[in-house]
Image (cartoon, helix red, strand yellow):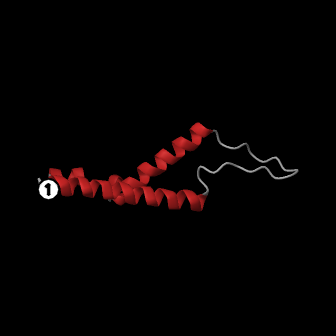
Amino acid sequence: MDALTNASLGARRNEDIALDLLKFIAETAGVGRTAVPATGFSGASAPKMEEQVTQLLELYSRCLKAVEGQGPEQKQAGKGPEKEAAR
């Protein structure tokens, strides 16, 4: 029973860390922020709400994979956890 409790706490911890990482990256890079028009200047139109949500969900997915140690470089090199378990 303790192993099940620890496993769920570990998974929740990774999700919390990924969420904090998402918040940091989104703030730093300005992801999900609406564009504020400047006087006399008409730049590119602001991304639609659906596009912003999609960007944030993709970013969260990437953050969670990074926290779990499943980054893109491991998948390309064939060193993901699923490959090592098969050996």
Q: How many marks?
A: 1
Q: Where is 51 relative to 35, above or below?
A: above
Tell me where residue 82 appears, x and y as whole percent: 23, 50
Q: Image point 38% across, 54% down: which residue? A: 64
* Kind of residue at badge 1: Ala
**In the drawing, does residue 38 fall left or right of residue 21?**
right
Q: Is residue 84 left or right of residue 40?
A: left
Q: Quadrant of residue 52?
A: top right
* 45 to 79, vertically: above or below: above
- Residue 36 appears left or right of 84: right
Q: Which quadrant would residue 26 be assigned to in this image?
A: bottom right
Q: Relative to the observer, which residue lies in front, 76 or 42?
A: 42
Residue in the image at 82% along x and 46% along y: 42
Q: Position of residue 71 (x, y in %)?
A: 37, 56
Quick check: can you spot residue 25?
yes
Tell which residue pokes out farthest to the right in this image: 40
The residue that appears at 78% across and 49% down in the rendered structure is 37
Residue highlighted by disc 1: 3
Can residue 70 be seen at all in this image of the molecule? Answer: no
Image coordinates for residue 22, horizontal then vertical, percent: 48, 56
Q: Which residue lies at the image location 52% right of the left edge and 41% below the top edge?
A: 54
Callout 1: few (<14), some (14-19), or many (20+) C-alpha neighbours within 10 Å?
few
Q: Left or right: 39 with respect to 4?
A: right
| Residue 27 % position (x, y) | 57, 59
Quarter of the figure that contains the C terminus: bottom left
The local secondary structure at tag 1 comes to: helix
